[in-house]
Image (cartoon, rainbow, N blue to C red):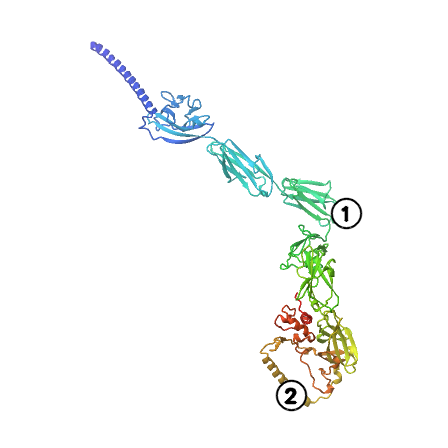
Amino acid sequence: MRQVDLIVEPLHKIIQFGMAVGTLAFFAVRLVLSGYIFAIVVYVNASGNWDKDDDPISTIEVNAVLGREASLPCDIVPSTRQDRVYMMLWFRDSESKPIYSFDVRGRAFNKALNWSDSSAVRPRAYFRANTTPATLTLTAVQLEDEGVYRCRVDFKKSPTRNFQVNLTVIVPPHQLLIYDGSGVEAEAILGPYQVGIEFSLSCEVRGGRPTPAITWFVNGKEVEGRVQETEHNIIVSKLTVPQLRREHLNTTYKCRATNTNLTAPLEKTVLLDVYLKPLSVKILSKPTVMEAEKEYSLTCEATGSHPRAQILWLEGNVQFHSDKVSNDGSSNVVLSTLIFSPVPEDHGKILKCRGQNPSLPGSYLEDLFQLNVVFPPKVSLHLGSTLNAENIKEGDDVYFECKVRANPEHHKITWRHNGVILTQNYSAGVIMSTQSLVLQSIGRDNAGNYTCLASNDRGETTSPTVLLRVQFAPVCRTREVTIIGASLEESVKVRCEVDADPSEVDFVWEFNNSGENFEVAPAKFDGNNGTMSELVYTPVSERDYGALTCWGRNVIERQETPCIYQVIPAVKPSPLNNCTIKASLNQSSEILEVECVPGYDGGLRQEFRLEAYEVLTGNLRINASSVSSETPIFRIAVSDLLPATHFYLITYSVNAKGRSEVSLLEDIVLRDSEKHADSGVSMVPLILLLIGCLMALGVTVLSVMLMMYRRRGTTSPVHIEPYMKQPIITPPDSRNNSMLDVTHGDHTYFVEYTLKQVTDYALNNQPDIIQSPQDQEKIKREPQLFLPVRPDTLFAPYDIHKQGLQTNRCSLNPFSAKSWEPISFKADRNLMKEIIIANTIPGPESCV
């Protein structure tokens, strides 16, 4: 056994040794094979020829700012806990050679080997393995660093991972400038500016890749600007404020430019300074009564001014000098306190507080009050400041300004023109506002004195008079045609008077008739006498009767319408017409008033006369003239006629050529009603009288019906006769005036009359007056004062002239050119004058 053991034991040792050697050889071979395989794998992956088993490569976008760090992420965490990282490699773009490696093989993780390519990223690259994910950091990034980077991670057990990172290098803008509207670079404060102007800012940004975005902020609120690109990598954004307001004071305007959030944006902020005038100036306390020598404290507050308001105290318009003025308050609200003791001489003075911005000339506000006074308004009137008082003519528009200073304030303004109160009348061009008067398209009648009157509780005051001069071309002082009567070889003075401003007028006289029209020689008239020219005219033949026209011219223009003087043969005046009597009560006695319608004056000035005669004796009792030179009005006292009771009156007119025919008011009876009162009453006469009245009434009604039938329903007083073809003028019914009751003392008289026109009143023996009751005759009354009269037969003595005129178509006779209409000579005296003119002009008719 021992021998066996001796043989087996060495063999056993040999076998164990062999096994140990074999094991070592196995591990050696395995280690060699593993390294070889790993090298092959690394080579294949590095050359890009072996990626069949790898995951798809994902791309991560990374931005980095020029000059700063760039962190390229790479996830190196194994998928299982039992696994670990062997190696990490970084490649640039498509290069096969790594630029950086992180080798953990055979060593602890925190002692891994870091290698970088010196020609690529060294020494600016380092790997941060303790972050999640791990990152390859590049410092001082350059533009050349931009590109695609690939990270490869090999694990002990897990498959290899690949990550792709696209690195973009951002170049931020390097300069930002703000310019004002004039192109001046803005500093921290813009301005100062004034309210109301346009304000603009420009923000200029230089550099930057990609193109930076420019944003405006107004008081922190984003607003939109207008962006425009310029050359050399410059971008400009413009911001405009159309009109500055008070609210823009201390507004901040910020311009921000940025193209990445990796760095703070480039921005600049400016503050807007705006000068503001005071919003309000107010005296906080205004004592209504102040006692002399007593100390008072007045405080004035000024708000809204920038810069800080300056407050001045003024007495009238002179600065109030006092050592007791103190100022207080903030920059926006300024308080100034005046402490003073008024003296009697201060009564009525104006104390003002003026707040002004010292940086804005003229931008001040005032508050004022009057010291211990209430008074009627102080009024001044001025012609409009834009008007030249010496160059106003017809057709211009003018205005007046009424300035009022009053305490208490005025409550009414009254305008006067030549003492007459003006009222607002838009259609007439008179417009009144608060303190102004506007006159549109003025005429010469608007010239004169103007005043404005202002009223308050203390009274009213009228302004000094302002004279408005309105220059105008000459116009006739008398607009109607002037009739001038002249005999042959008689020299008459024809005076042409015009109104004109300026009053230096040159005159031209012309004579016109149907045969000729020529200018009168200047030697026959005085043409250098202001607004009046006098012509001495002598008709030598009938052809010298016609129209004289007078034209005036001043610096404004020539007279638009001439003054017309119709020269006609002078004749006696026409008789008075339509005389009526009425009673009127005087203070002492009752009087009779006789009123007539004047006839044609014969071309000369006429006077009116009345004579009263007794019927029985023919004695002249009264010889009176008209109380009016234009209208024949006569007044007769009843006491002057008594005790006689029967009269007749004649009226006539007189001119230089003689007396007219007379108009007769005959059988005027002053009948005492008391003397004829009958004491006995008989029924039979009353019954007969009643029957007679009824019969008379029936006859009257029948007559009226026949007349209405003949008139065919018309109520016009005009009757057209077939042979005349012209109206017959029927004067109004005067029966209401044909009997008057007048009282004298204890007696009452009846006055009755009928008007007649006769050549010789002594030949008249047909009384139309009611006879006295003693005559027992039937009372007779004329239904009308005049008989119907036809115009072409009114003045028979002058028909010969009328016949000559009717042969000429250019006629002044109104009855030859138009159809007849109802005419009342009492109401139309001018028509009577035209008839006389037409009927008395000899020879060919004048055409004017």
Instruction: Name the residue carrying label 2.
Output: 691
On the picture, is 571 further left or further right than 175?
Answer: right
Query: In which quadrant is the C terminus drawn?
Result: bottom right
Q: Is residue 558 above or below residue 725?
A: above
Numbered mark located on residue 497 in the image: none
Q: Residue at the spot x=63%, y=73% of the render? A: 822
Q: Residue 568: x percent and y percent?
A: 70, 69
Disc 1 from disc 2: Cα separation: 100 Å
Q: Is residue 124 left or right of residue 353?
A: left
Residue 458 in view (yes/no): no
Nearest to the eye among marks 1 and 2: give it.
2
Q: Nearer the viewer, residue 158 or 504?
A: 504
Which image quadrant is residue 335 in? top right
Q: Nearer the viewer, residue 627 or 111?
A: 627
Above/below status of 542 relative to 762: above
Whole-percent x, y for residue 239 in the image: 53, 39
Residue depicted at x 75% and y 66%: 491
Give above or below for 230 relative to 421. above
* Quarter-of-image position of residue 95: top left
Q: Identify residue type, mark 2.
A: Ile
User: The N terminus is located in which quarter?
Assistant: top left
**Element marked by disc 2:** helix
N-term mark: 1 or 2:
1
Q: Which residue is mark 1?
A: 345
Q: Position of residue 29 (x, y in %)?
A: 28, 18
Few, some or many residues within 10 Å of mark 2 (<14, 14–19, 20+): few
> Label 1's element?
helix
Q: Residues within 10 Å of mark 1 (few under 14, many from 20)?
A: few
Viewer-proximal residue among 713 and 41: 713
- Residue furthest bottom in the image: 684
Residue 302 vertical placement versus 673 (above, below): above
* Residue type (three-letter) at the residue carrying disc 1: Glu
